[in-house]
Amino acid sequence: MAAVPEYFGSLVFDDRVMKANLSAEVYQSLRKTIDEGAKLNIGVANAVAAAMKDWAVAHGATHFTHWFQPLTGVTAEKHDSFITPSPDGGVIMEFSGKELIQGEPDASSFPSGGLRATFEARGYTAWDPTSYAFIKDKTLCIPTAFCGYNGEALDKKTPLLRSMEALNRQALRILRLFGSTEVKRVNTAVGPEQEYFLVDADMWAKRRDLRFTGRTLFGAKPPKGQEMDDHYFGTIKPRVAAYMTDLNDELWKLGILAKTQHNEVAPAQHELAPIYTTTNVSTDHNQLTMEVMQKVAARHGLVCLLHEKPFVGVNGSGKHNNWSIATDTGVNLLSPGETPYENAQFLLFLCAVIKAVDDYQDLLRISVATAGNDHRLGANEAPPAVVSIFLGDELAAILGCIEHDAPYTSIDTGKVRLGVDVLPKFRRDTTDRNRTSPFAFTGNKFEFRMVGSSDSIACANIMLNTAVAESLRVYADRLEGAEDFESALQAMIRKTIQDHKRIIFNGNGYEEAWIREAEKRGLSNCRTTPDCVARLLDGKNVELLTSHRVFTRAELESRYEVTLENYCKTIIIEANTMVDMARTEIVPAVEACVLDTARAAAAKKELVPGCSCEYEAGLVKRLSALVDQIAVRTAELEETVLALSAIGDIGAEAAAIRDKVLPKMGELRLPCDQAETLTPRKYWPFPTYGDLLFGVR
Ligand code: ADP
Ligand code: MG
């Protein structure tokens, strides 16, 4: 086996390959496009395409595809081979600059939330040269944005790139005010920690709920769950270790910086974290990681579950979005500095984030809203649905002193009067963490912990980038016009702390008391997806996202539609799966047991005159009663779902699903799970929680 540095990125058309395969002139020109967004001329595009094709063919590729991220949340690809007929009856392999830059997939079957009704049915994909092309399944994949013919974004990448641009624009204004001339670009960087479950593939195949919905819809509590805390960071079992080894290899070949792996809290739950990188690349990589995780699992007789809540009663899975802002000169703007100049700048960016998160709590909540994630948020295993910021006691105390212009007693320097440029050294202790906070400062980055495990990180970062861009815009507007920069800066930082301190909370986010306190502070608490999504179209949110040119109003309306459509469809499929399983698997299984037990009792009575058959009679009675209940509740759930079709409005339908369908699903599950605990195992039609959670060795 070759050493990792030898094969890392071997399937990526990265900078090393570009340098080696492009003329100096073409390389320079492409680099300018990648680094500064300069337009690429067709001559250069042709040269790049030819080099890409030669490289890809040499690595066994036969096809190419524009790889994009429609609103389905997963990636899409349509493969075209490189072949072109030659006059002699054979073929040659060809790939043009035009094909590289733009593709035209038939877009009509992707969700568009009504966007396409008003525009053309076709869409086009446009190359994102800032994310390297790579080879997957003998296909050269070109990361692209996906738009309608009038430029309307039909994907998650286009608004993400626009949000990065918005933040870059405003951050540069601020840096110029601080005297920086050399910084050309400010980017956000993200390291997403990905949680997942591994279950045995044979067991998975026997569960229609897992196959159709990605989560279990039935299942009694097993004798053992996560109460022993013996899985978290525990020794990795051989089969899982073999999977992780294989997974890392595949990811490394794709240039993905897979770094940390460990067992998570729930049995069968694990985590993979890459080293952070530029947000759009990180987003592409995370989509690719989720895909590769599932593919590699199949090779090991496993299935990788990315659902936010595959099992009731044990922790679900999230994706911590570690986020920071950095300059192209390598300065992390969320890192407290050594000099007064750096301190003032750090405080300003910190305040920009505090203001952004407070002003746009609802957008952050909306950005993680899915049917799956609703099961996690607020369930004491993930942050509550209330957005707040954890700064740590020390930093919070520092901000408190700045707010009140009070002296601060520091361990190192004693009493100091803080100004915008005088910051005491404070601990950057990354172990003393508050894991219950949805948005935690961890020394030089923020960790947004509300993202669901199966979600694209694009949405969360679009909202985060844009909200922070807006804070910076407000600051830049004020500071650019200020007579005295220093005092204006000081006043603005103080005012931000005063106006937005309600969003800062360092306590235990899982406590009921916090939810009440948050309400008093006027923070929003949207427990479910239908609760929050309507707010996407609130005036202030539309204003934010359109003024920074991240979404048009029509694009926002389409996201509203698609998010709710997705919520409704997901839960309707779950409800239908429950009806199907209850009727065709659970009821017949319990009935068979009832019948056998009754027969056994009759036989026993014949053999043992006077035998009361109390056990059999009791079991038959209890199971029969449960079967009746199951039958009634199945019918009720079915009717409730059917009644939805009479509702015309998507918002009303989503609300009905939340208020009527979900409770009916809960009601049906109850007698089924009870029956499971009473029915001898040989009758039960599918693997149990115990089998699934402890079945991989
Ligand atoms: P944990 O939260 O599990 O203790 P770490 O905080 O060390 O783990 O890292 C979590 C993730 O944060 C990793 O993906 C890491 O690359 C990323 N990360 C570290 N520094 C930064 C940064 N400055 N900006 C963005 N992400 C970062
Ligand atoms: Mg971690």
Image: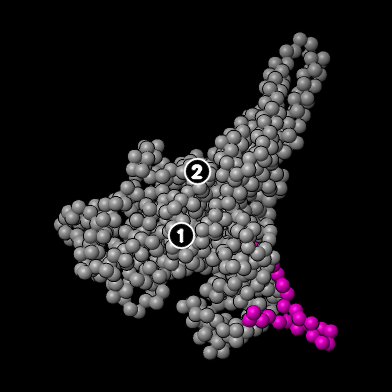
Q: Which of 362 and 208 is in front in this view?
A: 362
Q: Where's residue 593, x and y in %? A: 75, 28
- Left or right, residue 370 beside residue 601: left
Magenta: main secondary structure: loop
- Location of the N terminus (image quadrant): bottom right
Q: In which quarter of the image is residue 354?
A: bottom left
Compared to residue 677, the image places residue 140 above or below, namely below
The residue that appears at 60% across and 84% down in the rendered structure is 42
What amino acid does circle 1 point to? Answer: Leu
Mark 2 element type:
helix
Q: Position of residue 450 (x, y in %)?
A: 47, 51
Say whether residue 75 is magenta: yes
Of marks 2 and 1, the one in the foreground: 1
Q: Nearer the viewer, residue 431 or 310?
A: 310
Q: Where is residue 273 in the image (x, y as percent from the top left)?
A: 50, 60
Color scheme of the displayed model: one colour
Q: Say left or right for 4 vs 448.
A: right
Q: Which mark is residue 545?
A: 1
Residue at image mark 2: 531
Q: Are marks 2 and 1 in contact (CB under 8 Å)?
A: no
User: Which portion, as a residue range, is magenta?
Assistant: 73-98
Q: Count neighbours of disc 1 (C-alpha within 10 A) and say few if under 14, some if 14 to 19, many if 20 or more.
A: many
Q: Does the magenta stretch include residue 480?
A: no
The relative height of residue 2 versus residue 116 in the rendered view (above or below) is below
Q: Residue at x 58, y 62 (%)?
A: 155
Q: What residue type is labelled 2?
A: Asp
Judged from the image, the secondary structure of the residue bearing numbered disc 1 is: helix
**Residue lying at 71% horizontally and 48% vertically, measured from the top left:** 205
Label 2 Cα crowd, 10 Å radius (few <14 / some 14-19 / many 20+): some
